[in-house]
Image (cartoon, coloured by chain):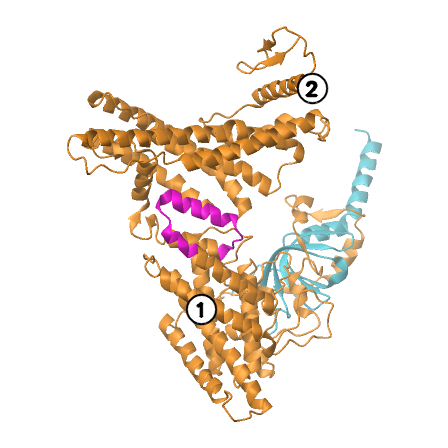
Chain colours: A orange, B cyan
């Protein structure tokens, strides 16, 4: 600071104290703009739970890099192999803890060597530290660029630490490789030879050198892999190499797991009272960055154990390897399904980010080569074969068509990109974001309907036998319904519903959503088949051999799956309704709870969508009444009640216009 | 207004003003910059916002110094924001007296 405040301090301790004692109990001295409400948000000093700065003074002196070197607590050179093994393993433990959502200050930067890599004389420590900083930097970039994380997933803040930006990737790889070669020489020279008895020291040296060698090689390969994934260009061709490296990493991890014990173990300190500090090996100081943390509650960071770390890394490699398969997916829908499926599995913020970056490494460009708008056009074409997008149509050459379709596709890019991106967020956030994207999709649906209507009018003028009704509309609708279904299903996964609500959730799925999904898929099915027939018709006269193989109902499988889910939901709904009738399902006291409020809240986000129209609570109630009554009547009939009556049943249409209550007399 | 009521009113006012003289002192401190030394050796500098009978004190825009702020070399303070210091942890209180002829910023 260039300008410094000059204070003119006057000691008022005694005046202050005596003045305070004059105050009555509960009386406050304060400005009119400062009240109890503001006072609530003050942090309390000297409270171990709130005062992060207090911990710096506890029990031992916290020393940074330079101080630790001067005090002889940190070695600048001649770091022994077991020490280095421990440093590497613990640094990876910090890395994993960071990836699980903790701050860099409390994880990786508790490693003092990472603070000043250029001041380290030990070549091995230096090379490893630089590589580590680079790895952290790349990871940070991948996750930040994908931006599918929230504060609970990932902390990108670097607290002003230097990330070795002055050293190039090639140089870093070279440095690690050099050390690797040196150590490999030790491994070779200490290897057991035939007819020669090694002494215990050589044997130990051999296993230590081997352990170190695998760790350094792993670090190098990890760095190369991540650097390969962090390209802003089409990497579909290099995915094979990435996978190869990942597999090598996994093999090395297995070997590292067997040599975990060779590193120095942390010495337990006498001080066991503190919850924030923990025993470490040379090179680490858990509290060194305590003052960099925000003045909120200190968060306790539990660093993963070395074994856990290696197991985690192994799983991480498998996840990233799986994610690479996205390049084999066909079309936008294939990719969306892949991403949805991956988000369903055990995933992490890194693998989800890598997936996003693989598919769209540059803004709005799929695999960095095709604009997303092109991909969407292709997708709509494959989905329902709209005449406007197909060759051999009078529409294809009309400039008005192009104008309208282009405008629609441009409007579609935003919500469809959002659909992809949502799959990268954690499950709880996904639900939130699905509700938002529904608004946008609803607007898009209106636009789609308008475009369809316009194109239809244009088409029937020249080709009256064909139609362009609800083509784009169906495509958007299909996604709207899928989003709605996902929204409701996520509610189960996140345990948001209480059992007495299950019946109307399943009812909505069964009666409305899956029903609509099946109908929209059947529609697309019909359109595709119709188009094939049209093409076949055109080609008939000219070339019989060129006849394409006819598509056989492209959505048959999807429709069957939707039907299965529909029946499953239906079955559950009926079972739950049955339980309620039997009085076996506890309901909350109605003074404190309104079923209508709950219902409207559960389906609130659907209100913005026109098709399918939201089903209001009253209608749902009416239908439920019908279903319940009929259920009882049928049960009675089944048990032989009034079996001798020949009177025809009565149908009452009072509760609902289409679904009557059956009455038998 | 009768003279008697006038007198009693004057008495009441005097009584009140005597009672609150010390309070006036405290109120004159409000929004001024204060330096608090805490029982663990840390110092806090911020503007005085609120206090009560037990001398619990709230500072706004508070900066935390591990060593006394006058000590060389100057340390970079940590920003705390709004902080409450319990009365029994206060070792000393200093007020930043600003005089007219002395410029505050050098």
In which quadrant of the rendered view does residue A208 lie? Answer: bottom right
Q: Are marks 1 and 2 on the same chain?
A: yes
Outermost residue toward the front in this view: A644
Residue that lies at the very extreme toward the top in this rendered image? A647
Q: Position of residue A328 (x, y in %)?
A: 37, 52
* Residue A249 percent coordinates (x, y): 46, 68
Q: Is residue A357 above or below residue A601?
A: below
- The quarter of the rendered structure image containing the N terminus of chain B is top right
Residue A506 picture quarter:
top right
Asked whether B90 or B29 is in front, the reply is: B90
Q: Is residue A582 left or right of residue A179?
A: right
Q: How many marks?
A: 2
Q: Residues within 10 Å of mark 2 (few under 14, many from 20)?
A: few
Q: Is residue A163 visible?
A: no
Give the residue drawn at x 42%, y 43%.
Answer: A418
Task: From this view, report whether residue A137 is shown above or below residue A627.
Answer: below
The relative height of residue A73 versus residue A138 in the rendered view (above or below) is below
Looking at this rendering, what residue extends furthest in the left direction?
A: A542
Q: What's drawn in magenta, residue-wise? A: A323-350
Frontmost of labels 1 and 2 is: 2
What is the secondary structure assignment of the residue under circle 1?
A: helix
Q: Is residue A230 magenta?
A: no
The residue where tag 1 is placed is: A248
Q: Going 34% across and 61% down the picture, which residue do you hit?
A: A238
Labels 1 and 2 touching (C-beta < 8 A): no
Residue designated by label 2 = A639
Residue A604, image x, y percentages? 54, 31
- Residue A462 visible in the displayed image: yes
Taking depth in this image into account, of A29 and A145 the one nearest to the observer is A145
């Amino acid at each position: 600071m260039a300008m410094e405040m000059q204070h003119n301090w006057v000691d008022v301790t005694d005046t202050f104290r005596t003045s305070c004692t004059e105050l009555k109990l509960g009386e406050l001295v304060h400005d009119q703009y400062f009240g109890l409400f503001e006072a609530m948000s003050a942090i309390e000093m000297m409270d171990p739970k709130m005062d992060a700065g207090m911990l710096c003074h506890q029990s031992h002196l916290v020393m940074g890099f330079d101080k630790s070197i001067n005090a002889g607590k940190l070695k600048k050179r001649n770091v022994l192999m077991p020490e280095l093994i421990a440093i590497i393993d613990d640094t990876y433990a910090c890395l994993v803890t960071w990836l699980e959502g903790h701050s860099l200050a409390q994880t990786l930067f508790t490693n003092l060597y990472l603070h000043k890599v250029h001041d380290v004389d030990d070549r091995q420590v230096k090379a490893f530290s630089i590589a580590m900083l680079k790895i952290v930097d790349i990871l940070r970039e991948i996750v930040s660029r994908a931006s599918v994380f929230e504060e609970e997933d990932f902390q990108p803040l670097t607290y002003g630490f230097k990330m070795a930006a002055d050293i190039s990737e090639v140089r870093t790889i070279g440095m690690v490789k050099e050390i690797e070669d040196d150590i490999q020489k030790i491994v070779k020279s200490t290897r057991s030879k035939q007819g020669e008895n090694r002494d215990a020291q050589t044997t130990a040296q051999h296993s230590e050198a081997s352990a170190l060698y695998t760790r350094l090689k792993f670090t190098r390969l990890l760095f190369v892999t991540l650097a390969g994934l962090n390209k802003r260009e089409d990497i579909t061709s290099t995915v094979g190499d990435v996978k190869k490296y990942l597999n090598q990493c996994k093999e090395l991890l297995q070997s590292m797991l067997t040599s975990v014990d060779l590193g120095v173990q942390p010495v337990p300190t006498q001080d066991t009272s503190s919850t924030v500090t923990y025993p470490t090996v040379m090179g680490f100081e858990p509290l060194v960055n305590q003052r960099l943390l925000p003045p909120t509650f200190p968060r306790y960071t539990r660093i993963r154990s070395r074994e856990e770390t290696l197991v985690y890394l192994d799983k991480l490699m498998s996840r990233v390897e799986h994610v690479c398969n996205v390049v084999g997916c066909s079309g936008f829908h294939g990719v969306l399904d892949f991403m949805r499926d991956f988000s369903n599995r055990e995933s992490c913020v890194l693998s989800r980010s890598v997936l996003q970056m693989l598919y769209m490494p540059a803004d709005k460009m799929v695999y960095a080569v095709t604009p997303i708008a092109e991909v969407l056009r292709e997708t709509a074409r494959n989905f329902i074969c709209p005449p406007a997008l197909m060759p051999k149509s009078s529409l294809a050459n009309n400039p008005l068509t192009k104008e309208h379709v282009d405008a629609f596709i441009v409007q579609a890019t935003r919500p469809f990109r959002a659909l992809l991106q949502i799959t990268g967020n954690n499950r709880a956030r996904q639900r939130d974001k699905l509700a938002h994207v529904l608004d946008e999709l609803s607007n898009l649906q209106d636009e789609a309907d308008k475009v369809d209507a316009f194109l239809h009018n244009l088409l029937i003028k020249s080709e009256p036998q064909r139609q362009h009704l609800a083509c784009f509309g169906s495509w958007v609708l299909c996604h709207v319904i899928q989003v709605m279904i996902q929204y409701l299903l996520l509610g189960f996964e996140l345990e948001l519903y209480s059992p007495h609500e299950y019946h109307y959730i399943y009812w909505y799925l069964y009666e409305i959503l899956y029903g609509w999904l099946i109908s929209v898929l059947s529609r697309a099915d019909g359109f595709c088949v119709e188009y094939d027939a049209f093409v076949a018709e055109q080609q008939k006269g000219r070339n019989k051999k060129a006849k394409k193989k006819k598509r056989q109902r492209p959505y048959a499988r999807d429709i069957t799956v939707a039907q299965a889910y529909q029946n499953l939901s239906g079955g559950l709904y009926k079972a739950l309704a049955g339980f309620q009738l039997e009085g076996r399902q506890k309901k909350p006291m109605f003074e404190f709870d309104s079923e209508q409020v709950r219902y409207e809240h559960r389906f609130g986000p659907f209100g913005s969508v026109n098709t399918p129209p939201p089903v209001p609570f009253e209608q749902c109630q009416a239908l439920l009444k019908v279903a319940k009554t009929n259920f009882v009547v049928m049960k009675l009939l089944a048990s032989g009640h009034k079996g001798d009556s020949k009177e025809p049943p009565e149908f009452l249409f009072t509760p609902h216009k289409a679904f009557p209550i059956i009455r038998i007399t | 207004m009768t003279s008697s009521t006038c007198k009693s009113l004057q008495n009441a006012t005097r009584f009140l003003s005597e009672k609150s003289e010390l309070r006036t002192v405290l109120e004159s401190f409000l929004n001024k910059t204060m330096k608090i030394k805490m029982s663990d050796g840390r110092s806090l500098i911020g503007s005085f916002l609120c206090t009560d009978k037990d001398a619990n004190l709230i500072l706004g825009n508070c900066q935390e110094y591990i060593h006394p702020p006058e000590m060389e070399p100057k340390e970079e303070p940590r920003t705390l924001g709004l902080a409450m210091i319990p009365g029994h942890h206060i070792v000393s209180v200093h007020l930043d007296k600003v005089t007219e002829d002395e410029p505050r910023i050098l």
